[in-house]
Image (cartoon, rainbow, N blue to C red):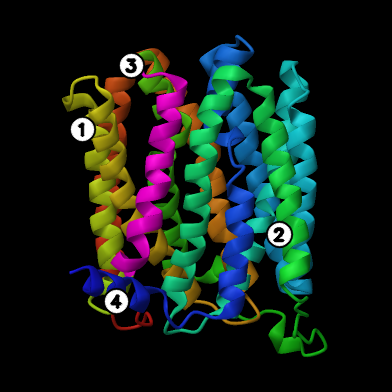
Amino acid sequence: MLAATAKIYKNAYSGLSRQTWLLSVVMLINRSGTMVVGFMSLYIVNGLGWKLSQAGVVMACFGAGSIVGAYFGGKITDRFGFYKLQVGALASGGMMFIIVGYLKAYIPLCIGTFILSLCNESFRPANSTAIAHYSTVQNRTRSYSLNRLAINLGWAVGGALGGFLAEFNYSVLFWVDGCTNIAAAGLMLFLLPPVKKNYDYKIPHQKLTGSPYSDRRYLFFILMVVLFAICFLQLFFTQSLFFKKEWHITESKIGILMAFNGLLIAFVEMVLIYFLEKRSRGLFYIRIGALLTGLGYAMANILSPAFTNALFVVGIVTIGEMLVLPFMNSYWISRTNENNRGSYAALYTIAWSVAQIIAPTFGSQVTEHTGFNMLWWTVGCICVVVAGGIWWLDSKSRSSIKSI
């Protein structure tokens, strides 16, 4: 039994390029210090003593910065390549984390959060393009899953440690996040050789090859991504407040819940993707994952307040996440080529950035006016709508979309 399990894990991780592994090591170091975003709402409400609605506005500024950063990140990636942008985004984002930790007034904190997010999120289109560059069509979904494994394993470490640090001093979170960002930039320079962009702008027809903004099916897919992300991001923006205020769970245990999300992904997702990626269409798994995510949130209204029940809720949402996100990445990459990949990645990142604006504002406003129960029922229903939209897209696209 043990030998069979070991063989399954070996097969799931085999065949990936050395650069893919090194890029994941960089992500692991970076995300091991990821603490600020998950605890930002608690920091603003409990640490600074501001209103929940003010926390929602600050987090909306984070989302606005994400949009600007993602847009220009995609443009820069297509023009100059992904390597230098990743290093610059990590280093500048690290410095901004430290600076934002010293901003205690409302307007400066909003502005600082916007700039921080702009720097930080410009990294994502470049990183997504890098993963595609270092992978093959056959192992691309697993390459993205390995990167997510590194992100979530780091999130598990950062979330657990962040929970204990938050009980001690919220300001320490900003320093740890900033220093790990800068360390990740240095590690990338040390481990991965520079990659030059092989794009010839002297060839006119290459300039306008395959714009994502004229790809109607992709635009519909992006709408579904926004709706799903609004629901999924409640896990980080609103659910921690729910567990604290309604279920009276301490910050340290909330950190454990965040760690549980990351650890479950780290130990299960690669094997899950290995078994699923050739058995059915990726859009089918996205549909099932959206339904599970909605069910997980709805269970918060059904179950009684208890830490074990909180683990169950987070677990169901996490299983939904593991089905949705890897295959979403595979879908958008299947519609690209070498010359427009940054733009497609940027639009996908922008979709999540738009959701980062809407999700905290939506969550905080619904909670303040109607309570957490209505919020969880609402996001559950939106997840059902997303599943229906993906089913429609799948039925229309089977004959023309590449196998994902």
Which of pointers 4 and 3 lies earlier in the amino acid sequence? Answer: 4
Could you tell me residue 42's position as x and y percent?
Answer: 53, 21
Q: CA distance from mark 1 to mark 4?
A: 35 Å
For the point 45% across and 24% down, which residue is it? Answer: 252
Q: Nearer the viewer, residue 182 or 77?
A: 182
In the displayed structure image, the side of residue 343 where residue 39 appears, left or right: left
Write down the quadrant of residue 105 in the picture. top right
The residue that disc 3 covers is 371
Which of pointers 3 and 1 lies earlier in the amino acid sequence? Answer: 1
Which is in the foreground here, disc 4 or disc 2?
A: 4
Identify residue type, mark 4.
Answer: Lys
Quadrant occupied by the C terminus: bottom left
Identify residue type, mark 3.
Answer: Gly
Q: Are marks 1 and 4 in contact (CB under 8 Å)?
A: no
Start-end of magenta stretch: 248-273
The residue that disc 4 covers is 7
